[in-house]
Amino acid sequence: MAFGLTLWGMPVSSSHAQLARKPSYYEKDAGAPSQNLVARPEGGSDPAGTMRGNQGTKGAPPELASMADRQEFDGLARVYNAGTPLAQPHVIFVIDRGNHRGNKASPRISYVNTPRFQLHDRFLRETGRFKGSRDEFNRNYAAPERRFILGTLSWQPQIQRFVFEFWEGDVLTPVLLQTARSMIAGSFFADAQFKANSTAQEQVAREAGIAVVTQAELIGQQRFLPLNVSRNTGRLRIIASLDAMRDLQPFDIVVLREVPISLPPVAGVITERPSTMLSHVNLLARGWGIPNAYVQDAGRQLKALDGQWVHLQVDTRDYTLRPATEAEREAARQRAKAQPRGRVQLIAPDLRSTKLQPLATLRAGHRTQCGAKAANLGEVRSARIAGTVVPDGFCIPFGAYAEAMGRFGLAERVARMQALPRFDTDADVRRAALARLREDIERMPMPGAVSEPWGSRWSQQLGGQGVFVRSSSSSEDLPNFSGAGLYTTVPNVKDAGALTDAVRKVWASVFNFEAWEARSTAGIAHDAVAMAVFVQKAVNSQASGVMITRNPLDPDAAHTTFIAAKRGLGIRVVDGHRVAEQVLYSSWSKAIQVLSQSGEDTELQLDPNGGVREVPLAGTGRRVLGDERVKRLAQVGKDIERRFGGKAQDIEWAVTDEQQIIILQARPYANPPAGGR
């Protein structure tokens, strides 16, 4: 069963499929500073497989001044997804306005034989209309009084109509846009709507009084979105509710009607609800290197395969699901049985000291005492990045956990737990045993000599304000193991007694079922894990979220930043239950693309009595982040990335009414294993 699907209004660089390609795929010979209108692989090859089927009509003219019908359009078009219901032909066009220095000639439009010329620059040079330098050609993307307007006309199957569009970084003006619309309306056989490829182009359309179709609107029509590109073989399981996840096996490929905040290791994920690329489930999928995709109405489409062994492949443009061969099935079973090799390099915890460490003293080297999460925040704070704040806090180090667990007799308890009948073979037995162990840890006596310094530090250093009590274990925020969503955070703790309870709860989360399963799959020895705790001032935020200092589908694209945002506290940004506002910013083109709008009608805020509360949203408008804030966040992300040696970062952030950017976490962005499974 194969599904050929088009992403987000191609062919302009508005889709993750397009954005996933490296900049060398774009119109570099035209000197454009970013991704250009018509994507093509270097040398004319097509490694991404995006150009399939009809590539125009043999013997078609080099250009047409008008198009009378669909046959003429198809004769000049290149086609994405040819032969599928979502085939998307496109034709590049050039509007010659004259030189605008005394030349009053009327503009003329040329619809270009796109398979033949491929690029605007090539067409203009080969037809003798332009002979200048690359810099001179680039004026046609930036100058209001440019000679040429360069665009693309395409058929959008999602909305069943033609659209015209421009490179995302094209600095359009209302006059240029009105000229293009007028020329197309007078020469093209069908109505064509303007498709904006950046927020700046949306604003120009409003000023010009021209209706626009946006990226977010097209995304909303998608039936498929790739969240992690990979392939694997496994047993298909359609999961109607989160309760049905209890017996999942590592070789299961799950179809989820709901998106959980965490997931035990599986072989692949298909969700029926769109989610952000930064959801905990997707970060886990990336770390495991398994395929993950949103497929509309997947449960109904795939019902006949429920319980069957299948091979799933997710790429940037489609997914394929077919019955597995016997050889593939046997190989998958053997992988599930095999002892993991342990590609994760854990932090070797220093257990000698129980001394509390204030954030101001923490640096990257303190990860052996306080874990990467706390140490990284100390490093970010010490960088003193302009316009940013890291809320103050302190670390309860690994040594305190080790000392407490020694009194508790943890090693003996874990050994007895693992000796239980069917513990290794029955997920329900493990789940119940781990729950009992967590309960015992959360209730274990805590000597006053141990807990009283926590309360004193909280009162003296943090002024007794509400705090978030967060995990900072030796097995999270690592280059090959993010640990996203595996351990517990207790929000907005308001008194010393509750602080002690919260610390025990975070300690106990070492034995969360999902954490145990994920470590087992990664080959991490459970007795090698220690838990530090980071106690940090709680901040009520106007908006919050997560950003990656790369394009999630192309971590090598260093010029892009991906941001997911919601109003209020950021707890829900990564839970996957509702789509966040998702924005892509290119420092190359300076374009901001809103890929989806926030689906929330409520937000989370700090409760004055402790914890968080849900409050309704009203009158806030659809956008969570304005353009200037997007640019500022992206710059802060790059500053943090430089602090960590240029390695892509996954950054948790928030903003307040005072417009400060608050940094709450910075960790390496987890790349999937090359090539998937």
Image (cartoon, rainbow, N blue to C red):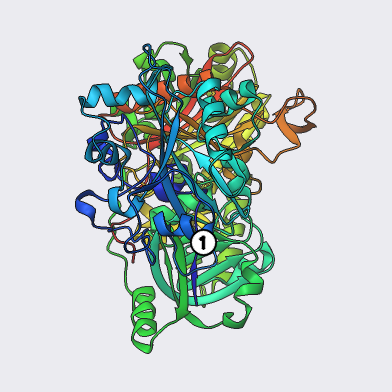
Q: Quadrant of residue 138?
A: top left
In the image, residue 83 sits, relative to residue 260, either above or below, namely below
Report helix, strand or loop for mark 1: loop
Question: Horizontal placement of 470 versus 328: left or right?
Answer: right
483 and 426: which is toward the camera: 483
Q: List x then y, in percent, for residue 533.
A: 49, 34
Query: Which residue is found at the position 59% from the left and 24% from the top?
Result: 203
In the image, residue 397 sits, relative to residue 235, either above or below, namely above
User: Which amino acid type is shown beneath numbered disc 1?
Assistant: Pro
Identify residue for label 1: 264
Q: Quadrant of residue 300?
A: bottom right
Q: Quadrant of residue 134?
A: top left
Q: List x then y, in percent, for residue 473.
A: 42, 41
Would you say residue 69 is visible in this rendering? Answer: yes
In the image, residue 65 sits, relative to residue 624, either above or below, namely below
In the image, residue 537 sits, relative to residue 523, either above or below, namely above
- For the C terminus, the quadrant is bottom left
Q: List x then y, in percent, for residue 344.
A: 30, 52
625 and 223: which is toward the camera: 223
Q: List x then y, in percent, for residue 589.
A: 38, 28
Query: Which residue is found at the position 39% from the left and 32% from the top?
Result: 370
Near mark 1 (Cα within 10 A), the count class, few <14, some 14-19 or many ≥20, is many
Question: Horizontal placement of 438 versus 99: left or right?
Answer: right
Q: How many marks?
A: 1
523 and 620: which is toward the camera: 620
Would you say residue 345 is visible in this rendering? Answer: no
Residue farthest toward the bottom in the current orientation of the protein: 326
Query: Which residue is found at the position 54% from the left and 46% from the top?
Result: 188
